[in-house]
Image: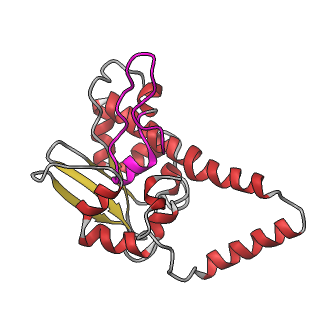
Amino acid sequence: MNRAQKHPDHDHSEPPSELELRVRALESLLLEKGLVEAAALDELIDTYENRIGPRNGARVVARAWSEAAFKQWLLQDANAAIAAMGYQGRQGEHMQVVENTPALHNLVVCTLCSCYPWPVLGLPPVWYKSAPYRARAVADPRGVLREFGTELDEEVEIRVWDSTAEVRYLVLPERPAASAGWSVDQLAELVTRNAMIGVEKARAPAPRGGRSETDAG
């Protein structure tokens, strides 16, 4: 469980939607009938929430870090650039990529529901859909970032982007220092789901022979 999910103010008091209720009912029925094991179901959800989807986005970001021409294309026409890598489909039709810089940090939220670019990020995390995050990301973005361990200098501008059915946003994090000459595969390991939402920065490269500074997605 990541840090945000542990925070008491990231509660889930909002009533579930009709779709969520239907999904829970179906899940209960499958478990009751013995058609699926709880552990297998949890593994499947974890795969789509934390592995497959975010890995697609990580490769998009890593390629943008590696290829200036692709980065320019991605920022100008995210739909086409992302589709060229084979990542497209429902919830990813209208994409816009926003770039973090030393002077600007971008943060994505959906204040109305939970609009989210599934093809590149997988399933939205629970905290992203919670009422406290949706409200506080707009009212107190710097405070929200601190809860995720992201401390920014006061002079850094924070820009909040509100995803809707018409447009979904993906953050292009700053490339970490000391990653010059890395391959796309190596760079992709530094990119997390949270970094592409904007609540965290990309992972810092590990010292030689070690692991990266943050291993939580």
Q: Is residue 115 visible?
A: no
Q: Can residue 71 be seen in this view?
A: yes
What is the total number of numbered labels drawn onto the structure image?
Answer: 0
- Predominant SS of the magenta segment: loop
Query: Residue 192 lies in magenta, yes or no?
Result: yes
Q: In this view, does 192 lie above or below 39?
A: above
> Which portion, as a residue range, is magenta?
190-217
x, y (%) of residue 128?
Answer: 44, 64
Please tell me which residue is depicted at 62% across the width and 75% down the height of the picture: 20
x, y (%) of residue 86?
Answer: 53, 42
Please tell me which residue is depicted at 31% across the width and 71% down the height of the picture: 136
Residue 135, by quadrant, is bottom left
Please tell me which residue is depicted at 46% across the width and 26% down the height of the picture: 211
Q: Is residue 96 left or right of residue 91?
A: left
Query: Residue 197 lies in magenta, yes or no?
Result: yes
Please tell me which residue is depicted at 29% across the width and 32% down the height of the picture: 176
Q: In this view, does 22 lie to the left or right of 2?
A: right
Residue 89, by quadrant, is bottom right
Q: Nearer the viewer, residue 53 or 217?
A: 217
Which residue lies most toward the left here? 155
Q: Nearer the viewer, residue 70 or 164?
A: 164
Q: How is the image coloured?
A: secondary structure
x, y (%) of residue 55?
Answer: 52, 41
Q: In this view, does 77 lie above or below 124?
A: above
x, y (%) of residue 33?
Answer: 90, 68
Q: In this view, does 88 lie to the left or right of 144?
A: right
